[in-house]
Amino acid sequence: DGGITQSPKYLFRKEGQNVTLSCEQNLNHDAMYWYRQDPGQGLRLIYYSQIVNDFQKGDIAEGYSVSREKKESFPLTVTSAQKNPTAFYLCASSISYATYEQYFGPGTRLTVT
Amino acid sequence: KNEVEQSPQNLTAQEGEFITINCSYSVGISALHWLQQHPGGGIVSLFMLSSGKKKHGRLIATINIQEKHSSLHITASHPRDSAVYICAVKGSGPSNYQLIWGAGTKLIIKP
């Protein structure tokens, strides 16, 4: 079955530690996205990648980093510089950056204490 | 003011009721997207529309481009419809590929 996987579903970290969230897709999509979701707010774009070896900052990139070394994978690192890292993180992909429809993974809930 | 506003924020109804969720936007758009987010967090696409009306099962989505407004209707609502419903718009213009997201409407259907 084609789809997007994110792991783990729940992640707990101590303040000051970097943490990497995994996102893998087998849909052969060129574009991938990372969103952050906080209670009562719409999704906010952290980073996106139009194609392998390329990525661009979204609206709230500070304190985050990404890589896109393989078409299938777009890991997100939440660094210690991110002031409020506790949130629900969603990864998505689309056939191309110009394509409207995005397909979402199940999400990772990160709690930093 | 957000560019995409949804109302109501929260909605609780009894099983069988007709449900309406609204989405208003203030930017020019090329398309509007309705999505459903289940309690576990996963998001699935329901409709994409740029004009008129679409129907899938008990779900109906309409859009009025002139009034910059869309509605999502659920007929014969069921507890399994309980979820957060999210509206997102794609701006018009060749370089405007990012989606602008509403905050979501949390729907609870009681048996």
Image (tube, helix red, strand yellow):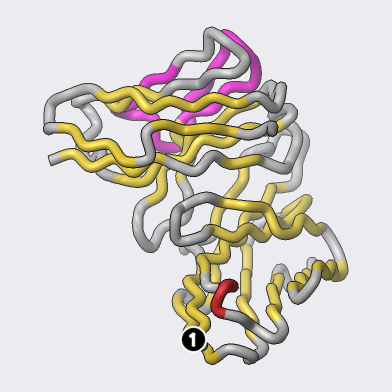
Q: Is residue B55 left or right of residue A98?
A: right
Please count the marks in the image. Answer: 1
Above or below, A63 against B2 in this view is: above
Q: Secondary structure at mark 1?
A: strand
Residue A50 position in % (x across, y down): 64, 21
Identify the residue at horizontal 57%, vertical 10% (top origin).
A70
Question: Which stretch did the figure color magenta?
Answer: A47-66
Farthest residue to the front: give it: A1
Please tell me whether residue A65 belongs to the stretch shown in magenta: yes
Quarter assignment of residue A52: top right
Above or below, A47 against B96 in this view is: above
User: In which quadrant is the C terminus of chain A drawn?
Assistant: top left
Residue A53 position in % (x across, y down): 57, 8
Identify the residue at horizontal 52%, vertical 50% (top origin).
B42
Q: Is residue B9 left or right of residue B78?
A: left
Residue identifier under label 1 = B110
Main structural element of the magenta stretch: helix, strand or loop? loop
Identify the residue at horizontal 35%, vertical 52% (top origin).
A38
Note whether residue B66 is visible.
no
Residue A99 position in % (x across, y down): 75, 35
Residue B35 position in % (x across, y down): 63, 58
Quarter assignment of residue B94: top right
User: In which quadrant is the N terminus of chain A drawn?
Assistant: top right
Q: Nearer the viewer, residue A37 or A57?
A: A37
Please tell me whether residue B38 belongs to the stretch shown in magenta: no
Q: Amino acid at mark 1?
A: Lys
Q: Is residue B66 left or right of residue A102?
A: right
Identify the residue at horizontal 48%, vertical 49% (top origin).
A43
Q: Is residue A80 left or right of residue A33?
A: left
Q: Which chain is disc 1 placed on?
A: B
